[in-house]
Image (cartoon, grey):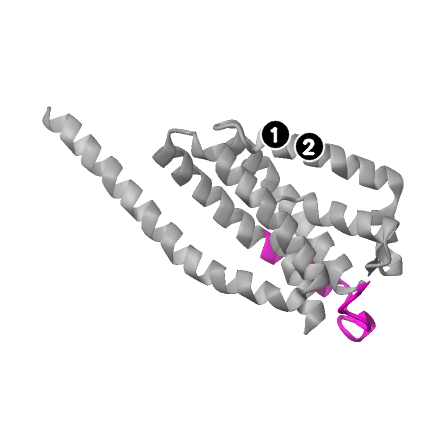
Amino acid sequence: MLEVLTGSGLAASAGLNAYIPLLLMGLLSRYTDLVELPSGWQWLGNGWVVLILAVLLAVEVVADKVPVVDHVNDVVQTVVRPTAGGLAFGAGAGSETVTVSDPDTFFSTHQWVPVVVGVLIALGVHLLKAAARPVINATTAGVGAPVASTAEDATSVVMSVVALLLPVLVLVFLVALVFFVPWLFRRRRERRRERAAARAAGFRV
C-alpha cells in the first residue's frame, strides 16, 4: 500500500511540476541514504541528469509565472508532465525509502503498469491545473498567475517529500482534490454565465 501512495504522490506532484519529483528523487538518491532507486531507475541520480533537470525546472518556474506564457507552457507540458508522472510513479513505487523497505513485492512482474498509472495520475492533475489557471488569470487580471504558480510549485515539493518520507499523508492531498474538482467546475460555469451576461448586455446597448 505504501508503494502505491509513494508512486501516486510523486505522479501527482509531476502533474503540477514535471521536474520537481524527478529532481528530488535524483538528489536524495545521489547525496543521501533516504532513497535507494531500483536498478532500472538509477540514471535519475546521474550528475548530468540532475543538472539537466535543474535547468529545466528553472525554465519551468519562470515560464509558469507569466500570464499567457503560462497557458502556452501548459499546452507544451500536456506531454511532458504525464511522461514525468509515469517515470516518477515507476521509480518511486520501486524505490526503497525510509518507509518502503520491500518494494519488490509490488508491481514485480508487470513493470509497465506503474508507468501507465503514473501517466494517468499526472495527466489528471495537469488537466485540473491547466483548467484552473485561466479562471485564476481572468478573475485576478493576471496578477494571480505568479501566486498560483508559486503555490503549485510549493505543493509539488511538499507532495514529493511527503510521498517519499510519509506516504500515508498523500491521502490528505487526495481528499483535498475531491473537494477542489467540484469547486473548479462550478467556478468555470459561473465564469461562462458571466461572459454570456456581459455579451447580452453589450448587444442590448
Q: Residues within 10 Å of mark 1 (few under 14, many from 20)?
A: some
Q: Is residue 119 left or right of residue 131?
A: right
Question: Nearest the camera: 82 or 47?
Answer: 47
Q: In the structure shown, which secondary structural element does the residue marked by tag 2 occupy?
A: helix
Residue hosting label 1: 62
Residue 1 shows which numbered tag? Answer: none
Q: Residues within 10 Å of mark 2 (few under 14, many from 20)?
A: few
Query: Does residue 46 appear in the picture of this structure?
Result: yes
- Name the kind of residue labelled 1 in the image: Val
Q: Which residues are magenta?
A: 96-122
x then y, percent, for residue 91: 77, 58
Residue 31 is covered by the magenta coloring: no
x then y, percent, for residue 41: 84, 55
Vertical arrangement, residue 139 with respect to residue 104, above or below: above
Residue drawn 37% across the image and 33% down it: 140
Q: CA distance from mark 1 to mark 2?
A: 6 Å
Quarter holding the C terminus is top left
The quadrant in which residue 39 appears is: bottom right
Vertical arrangement, residue 11 with respect to residue 168, above or below: above
The quadrant in which residue 201 appears is: top left
Residue drawn 49% across the image and 65% down it: 175
Residue hosting label 2: 58
Q: Determine contact: label 1, label 2, CB under 8 Å.
A: yes
Residue drawn 83% across the image and 40% down it: 49
Residue drawn 75% across the image and 36% down it: 54
Residue 106 is covered by the magenta coloring: yes
- Name the kind of residue labelled 2 in the image: Ala
Query: Does residue 117 appear in the picture of this structure?
Result: no
x then y, percent, for residue 166: 68, 65
Quarter holding the N terminus is bottom right
Question: Nearest the camera: 75 or 1?
Answer: 1
